[in-house]
């Protein structure tokens, strides 16, 4: 069972890496400039163990409770943990126990709460500002509009326990992802005008990683193409 699963994950991973390689060639970009984050939400810790032996070094999770349990079961793995789902302020302390990166900072009160929690724990936290890419902005899906993102980034720079690392975006459900990723790249350029080191662009999922890479993504967040269809959420 687990050998079969390992072979299946290895095959899927190889296919995704080939897509990333080819997208980098097509975009004239260095492959080393694109990091693969495997989004493991809904899949068991045993899959994360297998993925780590296959060389995956970054996991994305979207729910605190589920992520924390898997992190505890995988504590020995040499991997980084990314929160890619929306975060409630009352979960901040819990998330700081397992997350290395919070990719979904979209409002000042959340940034302030993360900064305070990091300070209490005597650690720093890498954060990405989530930019809503729908037009008009649909903040129900998380993220702040492009202008708000720049203003938020400016505030995050004043918080002494947060490291502003860049931006994150999810393409709209409808329409052409390339145009949305291009808007995200514009926001990234504006933020890098304030903070040149904040150059990470997290964009692209199983269905649109090529469009993201052409538009400058430095991280792609891939779930289904590596792990298979997700079980339905309870
Ligand atoms: C689930 C999820 C992904 C991965 O999506 P796939 O289509 O399965 O590759 C990427 N980003 C976020 C924010 C997600 O919630």
Image (cartoon, rainbow, N blue to C red):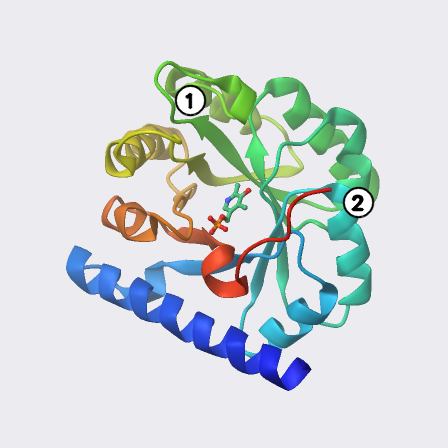
Q: Is residue 84 left or right of residue 72?
A: left
Q: In the rendered structure, which disc, 1 or 2, sits on the residue that comes first in sequence?
A: 2
Q: Residues within 10 Å of mark 1 (few under 14, many from 20)?
A: many
Q: Which residue extends farthest bottom?
A: 3
Task: Examine the rendered structure and indicate whether residue 62 appears above or below residue 79.
Answer: above
Q: Which residue is mark 2?
A: 65
Give residue 172's position: percent from left, percent from top. 38, 30
Question: In screen coordinates, is 10 left or right of 1?
Answer: left
Q: Secondary structure at mark 1?
A: helix
Residue that sits furthest to the top in the current view: 136
Q: Residue at x 49, y 26 (%)?
A: 153
Residue 47 % position (x, y)? 66, 69
Q: Quadrant of residue 145?
A: top left
Q: Residues within 10 Å of mark 2 (few under 14, many from 20)?
A: few
What secondary structure is marked by label 2?
helix
Asked whether 84 or 138 is in front, the reply is 138
Check the picture and name the quadrant holding the C terminus: top right
- Give x and y (percent) for residue 51: 59, 72
Q: Quadrant of the N terminus?
A: bottom right
- Asked whether 224 or 34 is in front, the reply is 224
Q: Which residue is mark 1?
A: 150
| Residue 77 against residue 101 in the figure, above or below | below
**Does 145 sit above or below residue 216?**
above
Distance between the Cα atoms at labels 1 and 2?
Answer: 30 Å
The answer to whether the beta carbon of the residue marked 2 is less than 8 Å from any atom of ligand 1 is no
In the image, what residue occupies the spot 51% across and 21% down? 152
* Residue 144 location (% of width, % of height): 48, 20
Q: Is residue 225 left or right of residue 192?
A: right
Q: Is residue 111 left or right of residue 19?
A: right
Residue at the location (30% across, 33% down)?
Answer: 189
- Hey, which quadrant is residue 192 in on the image? top left
């Amino acid at each position: 069972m687990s050998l079969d699963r390992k072979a299946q994950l290895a095959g899927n991973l190889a296919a995704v890496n080939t897509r990333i390689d080819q997208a980098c060639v097509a975009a004239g970009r260095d492959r080393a400039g694109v990091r693969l984050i495997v989004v493991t939400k809904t899949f068991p810790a045993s899959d994360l163990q297998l993925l780590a032996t296959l060389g995956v070094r970054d996991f994305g999770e979207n729910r605190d409770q589920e992520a924390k349990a898997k992190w505890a079961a995988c504590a020995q793995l040499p991997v980084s943990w990314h929160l890619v789902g929306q975060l409630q302020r009352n979960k901040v302390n819990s998330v700081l126990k397992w997350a290395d990166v919070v990719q979904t900072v979209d409002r000042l009160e959340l940034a302030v709460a993360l900064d305070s929690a990091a300070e209490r724990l005597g650690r720093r936290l890498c954060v990405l500002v989530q930019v809503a890419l729908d037009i008009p902005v649909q903040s129900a899906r998380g993220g702040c509009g492009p202008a708000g993102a720049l203003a938020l980034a400016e505030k995050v720079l004043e918080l002494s326990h947060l490291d502003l690392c860049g931006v994150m975006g999810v393409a709209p459900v409808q329409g052409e992802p390339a145009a949305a990723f291009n808007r995200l790249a514009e926001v990234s350029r504006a933020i890098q005008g304030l903070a040149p080191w904040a150059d990470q662009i997290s964009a692209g999922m199983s269905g649109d990683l090529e469009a993201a890479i052409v538009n400058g993504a430095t991280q792609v967040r891939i779930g289904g193409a590596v792990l298979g269809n997700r079980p339905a959420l309870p």
